[in-house]
Image (spheres, grey):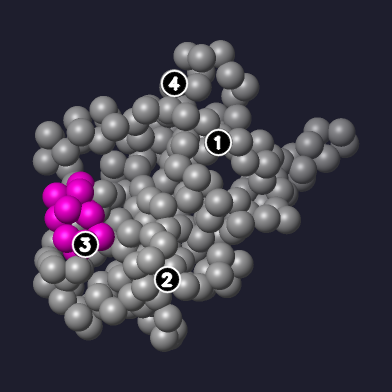
Amino acid sequence: MKIYLATSNEGKIREIKTALADSAVELTPIDIDLDEIEEEMKLKGVTNMEEISKAKALKAYHKIRERGLENNPIIVDDAGIYIEGTDGPGIDTKKFVKDCGGVEGLKGVLIEGQGAYFQSVISIMRDGLIRPESFIGRINGHLSIKGNFSEIEKGFPFNHFFIPEGRSEFMAEIPLEQRINYNHRMKAAHELREYVENLAEKEELMAGESFK
């Protein structure tokens, strides 16, 4: 099944493609600006990651049709970190990092050993759905400022501060192919994979019934 992925973020593309490897999904990244819909939701007081993700998926679905592209399903991914004792930064993780002054600033703000969890929401919109469906991946762990910052993983600075539960190394140190059980985005993508495979099976059954 061909599916569009609404992002130009190479890190997101790499992680989701790895989680969907050898599946029925043929992923095609497509650059769609969805920042406006996110800001509109926040102005309305909506900060729930799943609701924002679904709104963006619906907007992306309409945008690809406005462009005259194939009627393939489209997915969007939203992710962020939630730090123990706070309400976020969550959906505002990117802004939080920027406001802190990047990686160097985070070293002075984060508390050694503080609990945290990463969350990713992948939402899909396709023909036949009234509202997008979503898949959530969550990874618990804790923060440490004792990581190796010589080479920062582009787009994912918190990977150098976050140690997943059950591991002793930082997220950034875990090889990509081993992250499936320790990465929020890849967990959500695995849920999507099961959904698509079940959907493909149903479509095959329906096609078979039509020939009887």
Which of label 3 and label 4 is nearer to you?
3
Instruction: Residue 123: give x, y in percent of width and height.
Output: 43, 44
Between discs 3 and 2, the one toward the N terminus: 3
Q: Which residue is mark 3?
A: 104
Q: What secondary structure is marked by label 1?
A: strand
Between discs 1 and 3, the one toward the N terminus: 1
Magenta segment includes 184: no
Q: Which residue is mark 4?
A: 63
Please tell me which residue is depicted at 29% across the width and 44% down the height of the picture: 51
Q: Which residue is mark 1?
A: 29
- The local crowd at label 2, few if under 14, some if 14 to 19, many if 20 or more residues have their Cα within 10 Å, is many
Counting labels gives 4
Q: Are marks 3 and 2 in contact (CB under 8 Å)?
A: no
Q: What secondary structure is marked by label 2?
A: helix
- The local crowd at label 4, few if under 14, some if 14 to 19, many if 20 or more residues have their Cα within 10 Å, is some
Q: Which numbered tag is attached to residue 171? A: 2
Between discs 2 and 4, the one toward the N terminus: 4
Which of label 1 and label 4 is nearer to you?
1
| Disc 3/disc 2 C-alpha distance (Å) | 18 Å
| Disc 2/disc 4 C-alpha distance (Å) | 34 Å
Between discs 3 and 4, the one toward the N terminus: 4
**Quadrant in the rendering for residue 60:** top left
| Disc 2/disc 1 C-alpha distance (Å) | 24 Å
Q: Which amino acid does the dot numbered 2 rest on?
A: Met
- The local crowd at label 1, few if under 14, some if 14 to 19, many if 20 or more residues have their Cα within 10 Å, is some
| Disc 1/disc 3 C-alpha distance (Å) | 31 Å
Q: Which amino acid does the dot numbered 3 rest on?
A: Glu
Q: Which residues make up the magenta segment? A: 95-106
Q: Are marks 3 and 4 in contact (CB under 8 Å)?
A: no
Q: What secondary structure is marked by label 3?
A: helix
